[in-house]
Image: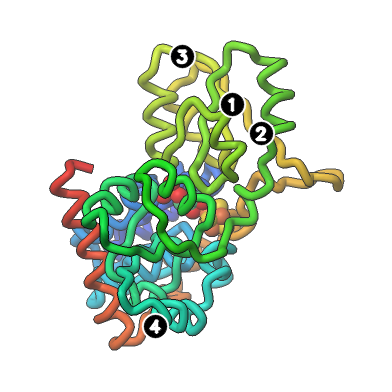
Amino acid sequence: MNLSEEIRRLAREKEAVILAHYYTEGAVQDVADFVGDSLGLAQQAAKTDARIIVMCGVHFMAETCKILCPGKKVLIPDPAASCSLAESCPAEEFAAFVRAHPDHKVVSYVNTSAAVKAVTDVVVTSTNARQIVDSFPKDQPLIFGPDRNLGSYLNDLTGRQMLLWDGACHVHERFSVTKILELKAAYPNAKVLAHPECKAPVLQMADVVGSTAKLLKHAVHSEETEFIVVTESGILHEMKKQAPGKTFIPVPPEVSGEVGCACNECAYMRLNTLDKLHRCLLEETPEVDVPAEVRRKALRPIKRMLDISARLGL
Ligand code: 13P
Ligand code: SF4
């Protein structure tokens, strides 16, 4: 039996569901029960009847599973799988920022720690952020954290002036207009697909801006056949799988520099390997836990996001 088959056997034996994000390596995506974006992964966690959830993603995604399913064992193949964006928003500092603006409601991107979610009114992902921001009265002042790029993109879309936390993702910050222009010259018919964590000048060049799931859906279902993909390159695995006849061009980041640099890969997501997934299922560790009080406070804004998304059919 090869490693993937052994992982599937263990998952059955242990009543475990394997959830994987589109940025993990192809072999991990292929062995998972469900591959999705942040919203899809949270939705799957909320409805699973498995005994164990294995989150092949990053730490905040596993925390969200634990908050939604406190009675289940939540495992992560490598506990070092953090997120630079979540790290750019330390909970104590964010809580002080929130306290300094008592008239503001707090909208937090899902890429945050459970402790940040605990001082949040509603969580969003890039799939539902616009609609959720729009659901607040126009005169309601809002704080948005932690991604300054997604935040200013949302301010442009909604005509608001949300107060933005100054955080960013180390992968998406590195994509540059220069590289995209070079690729556009080489592939003049290609459409540009970009994740909203990219900087504003990059987003202005995009034909489609959206979550990983939205970019994938567009790539598969549109008539277009060539795409310059401005996000973490792991998404190309599912794009090629679902649209084998189309051409997908990953964007090399501007500050690659060193030979062998894989700066358009999220080093944290790539910590999820088949070997670690196998060991994690076998030993039922490392487990992710969230202190009860934080869990209780963080559940409300996550549930609010899931309820609004369900109402919107997202
Ligand atoms: P998605 O919700 O679009 O999958 O984004 C998650 C993420 O971490 C992007 O960097
Ligand atoms: Fe976090 Fe960026 Fe990795 Fe997404 S790509 S998980 S935002 S570090």
Q: Is mark 4 within 8 Å of ligand 2?
A: no
Instruction: Report which residue position mark 3 lands on.
Output: 224
Q: Residue 8's x, y, as percent?
A: 38, 52
Which residue matches tag 4? Answer: 99
Type of amino acid under label 2: Val
The circle on residue 251 is 2
Direction from residue 176 to residue 15 in the image, left or right: left
Mark 1 neighbour density, 10 Å: few (under 14) some (14–19) many (20 or more): many
Q: Can residue 197 be seen at all in this image of the molecule?
A: yes
Q: Quadrant of ligand 2?
A: bottom right
Taking depth in this image into account, of 250 and 190 the one nearest to the observer is 190
Residue type (three-letter) at the residue carrying disc 4: Arg
**Residue underneath mark 1:** 228
**Picture quadrant of residue 179:** top right
Residue 66 coordinates in the image, percent (x, y) = 32, 72
User: Could you say which is closer to the camera, residue 176 or residue 162?
Assistant: 162
Q: Is residue 298 above or below residue 292?
A: above
Circle number at residue 93: none
Q: Are marks 1 and 2 in contact (CB under 8 Å)?
A: yes
Circle nearer the N terminus (1, 2)? 1
In contact (CB < 8 Å): disc 2 and disc 4? no
Give the label, 4 or 1, closer to the camera.
Answer: 4
Q: Quadrant of the C terminus?
A: top left
Q: Give the CA separation, mark 1 to mark 2.
A: 7 Å
Give the x, y percent position of residue 265: 63, 47
Of the numbered discs 2 and 3, the one sitting upstream in the chain is: 3
Specify the amino acid type for callout 1: Ile
| Element under disc 3 | loop
- Check disc 1 and report its element: helix, strand or loop: strand
Q: CA distance from mark 2 to mark 4?
A: 40 Å
Residue at the image position 61 percent from the left and 38 percent from the top: 201
